[in-house]
Amino acid sequence: MAKELKDLTKRSENYSQWYNDLVVKADLAEQSAVRGCMVIKPYGYAIWEKMQQELDRMFKETGHQNAYFPLLIPKSFLSREADHVEGFAKECAVVTHYRLKNAEDGSGVVVDPAARLEEELIIRPTSETIIWNTYRNWIHSYRDLPILINQWANVMRWEMRTRMFLRTAEFLWQEGHTAHATEQEAWEEARRMLDIYAEFAEKYMAVPVIKGVKSANERFAGAIETLCIEAMMQDGKALQAGTSHFLGQNFAKAFDVTYVNKNNQPEYVWATSWGVSTRLMGALIMTHSDDNGLVLPPHLAPIQVVIVPIYKNDDQKSVIADAVAPIVKELRAMGVSVKFDDADNKRPGFKFADYELKGVPVRLAIGARDIENGTVEVMRRDTLEKHETSLEGIAQYCKDLLEDIQNNIFKKALDHRASLTRTVDTYEEFKEEIEKGGFILAHWDGTTETEEKIKEETKATIRCIPFEGDKTPGVCMVTGKPSAQRVIFARNY
Amino acid sequence: MAKELKDLTKRSENYSQWYNDLVVKADLAEQSAVRGCMVIKPYGYAIWEKMQQELDRMFKETGHQNAYFPLLIPKSFLSREADHVEGFAKECAVVTHYRLKNAEDGSGVVVDPAARLEEELIIRPTSETIIWNTYRNWIHSYRDLPILINQWANVMRWEMRTRMFLRTAEFLWQEGHTAHATEQEAWEEARRMLDIYAEFAEKYMAVPVIKGVKSANERFAGAIETLCIEAMMQDGKALQAGTSHFLGQNFAKAFDVTYVNKNNQPEYVWATSWGVSTRLMGALIMTHSDDNGLVLPPHLAPIQVVIVPIYKNDDQKSVIADAVAPIVKELRAMGVSVKFDDADNKRPGFKFADYELKGVPVRLAIGARDIENGTVEVMRRDTLEKHETSLEGIAQYCKDLLEDIQNNIFKKALDHRASLTRTVDTYEEFKEEIEKGGFILAHWDGTTETEEKIKEETKATIRCIPFEGDKTPGVCMVTGKPSAQRVIFARNY
């Protein structure tokens, strides 16, 4: 067994350490020399690229276009929207100078005090302000609407506690920013994008999510309502996987963006914004992986099938290579990403452990005897089950198996979530149950005070007011006041 | 004729103004509220995305992988390589604080002096330093080499004079950073990537380029040698379209990156870096476009064929739509990007002018009479020639025409370059000729002094010492000292 694999902490011992180990050992990312910023390594980035491709396609199919807005935002822009500045000013990177100069003592370079900016610039924590300042010049009439734009970009939030992928100072994301003539259209857009996120999470990441709306406390700074998808990790903690904001006319008013409607009257423009980030990588890792390493959903795995030849000499190697070549070709023609790893400098056992660690969904091992018998050994990463099958039709077999794995890990995650989702009616019971992890469905009186009391006493927050499920009214488990429906409580990442 | 089109400055009147007008009017980009930073609008970004796709494919086909490194670089990293800091410290954005706070007078937010960073961070102007600091931990043995990594990112250089796409404070680019065991391998890599850039420029952008090496004066700060591709714009000025640097062991030494070779001896690692940026958009625009607007090479045009129906009533519109549907389908099946613009709110004349402005390579106009006659009007954007052809086989006809346009605009640019490339032998002649624009092939003694004298007196720089062409030695046109070969002089962007 490879050394890297042996060193992986077990989930049961320390889930948090297992995650950190896995991110590093599976070559996904590592800490950089800059506090809170990570290096995304090629294997991690390849998974992110697959996510990007699918999301980008889904955005374009729903009429969105990509564009690019500046990294830096004038400090004064932040203050235009009262909640927005409150939410972001306290953790932003501030550019104050535009030049360094040689230190007089020859010790390197220092900030040149003569090159101080008149107005400081902040590195975007999100781009509503710079984008709505731009939209003012783009929007005049109802004919200019809607504007459906997305941006793939890096953003920065000076978080104090960081964890790779889950919470980093700099992260990669996409941010959609749309402008609409009517409130209804904007609402429909916010909801449409939430549905796209949910579809992506479930169909590609194989991560089941609950769609809902955030409480005021958890709302995006500057939004009227924040919609979200919430996922449950293996340790029972919740992870917010994506948000879609109905911004109302807040940013239009802050940046004076009006349009002339069909009745020739000026009106403020309605807005949405929505985003998912490299945080999704964290969700992907923590939903499916095990003590042997990553388990990747086939729809996002950079390598879907790996073929490892088992040979004792060059003759055998050559016989196997000849037999494998048409299989590789057939798999590629089917759109399956396949790697034939015939490197001589690593033993099969090392390769097996390494591909397990990296989460490759299907592994074929094939020796000279297999060729003679027309067989091949198949290992599926999700269950680690091995079996022998016929070489004939192996490409189609792999393709079907990949779909089976995709469905299986989704179902496993769904079952896990169901097993850790409970309904409680009293606060006493809630306090007991929350210690066991998972989602708790409970009644809440709708006030921030009660939500904060619960958070203080139990570390649980309201993950969302779910759109689907039981809508029966009741009474708040804490105050006994009326509650419109049960909401989802959990501890969260 | 559409208003936007009429307002476009003519090249003969003011080439520079024509360029600025065109960038804005064709909806490619606009200035932002942040000095020197632009907004890349959806149409401009769509062209950049096509460039990215092709380049990314070419990089991956040659064994490179993408990764992502931090935006911010500790100030001290810059100083590690003496030439590098000299080249970049004087124009960089410096992050000094990580928090804003409410101003005491209620006037918004101000920098919080309590949140000053211990060490300032600079926004990457290029990533050699942060990447080589990372590579130190990745490279131990010759088995870890080569490392072939590329990054798609934004970078920032605080340029004093900016022009959209050509020179902006923030720009988008890719930067390759490779690590090798031997000098020869690193040289081969630097040269391979230069060839890829040249192939991309010529086959996709239809921009002919000259490959060569930079003089010491124009070398990348920290490189041993800088290779480049140089293009000629319509006004005869040169534009550096891409660079590939042989970095020797400079960064390995600066960041102490060694490996153990096959003989078990430690050695410093050899490096290259190479990049192209959104500057290519400027080259694309200035090489092909005309007084009617953009001319886009078909291989990079977001819309390759536009079909405009000409109708007087809904019946005609419907007949045309029925006839066009299978053509659209057939074109798409051929991989041709096609738009059928049947919007009612714009007249055909407006649409024609708009698609000319946007550089759509092929326009089909089709009326009810055409359907009866089985004909269609074809306009090719490069020559603005219109003619009638048969509707039968129109999809294949368009596909062939696109290739013809691609070849034609390349040839046109090549002929233009040839017509503005001259050989001179005396400095007097040189001073006369340089005023007329274009490339001047002349002998130079190889010294920085002479190069700088020429630059001061004529504003011309050495664009490159070309790899191909006449290699006959001679004497420097200024000093009479020996010259190994003619070099290319030009004024440049």
Image (cartoon, coloured by chain):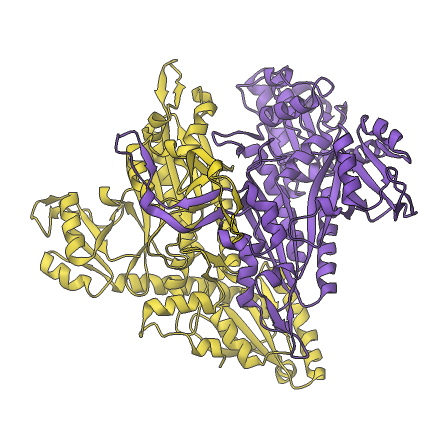
Chain colours: A purple, B yellow
Answer yes or no: is residue B459 visible: yes
State the image quarter where residue B123 is shown.
top left
* Residue placed furthest toward the left: B480
In percent of width and height, residue B201 lies at 40, 53
| In this view, B422 is above or below A466 | below
| In this view, B309 is above or below B413 | below
Answer yes or no: is residue A403 visible: no
| Apparent side of residue B77 relative to residue B53 in the rendered image (left or right) | left
Q: Residue at x 79, y 28 (%)?
A: A437
Q: How many marks?
A: 0
Q: Front-most of A294 and A278?
A: A278
Q: Front-most of B142 and A254?
A: A254
In percent of width and height, residue A368 lies at 65, 20
Q: Front-most of B440 and A142?
A: A142
In percent of width and height, residue B172 lies at 46, 49
State the image quarter where residue B127 is shown.
top left
In percent of width and height, residue A101 lies at 30, 39
Please state, as top left, top right, bottom left or bottom right, where the C terminus of chain B lies in the image.
bottom left
State the image quarter where residue A141 is shown.
bottom right
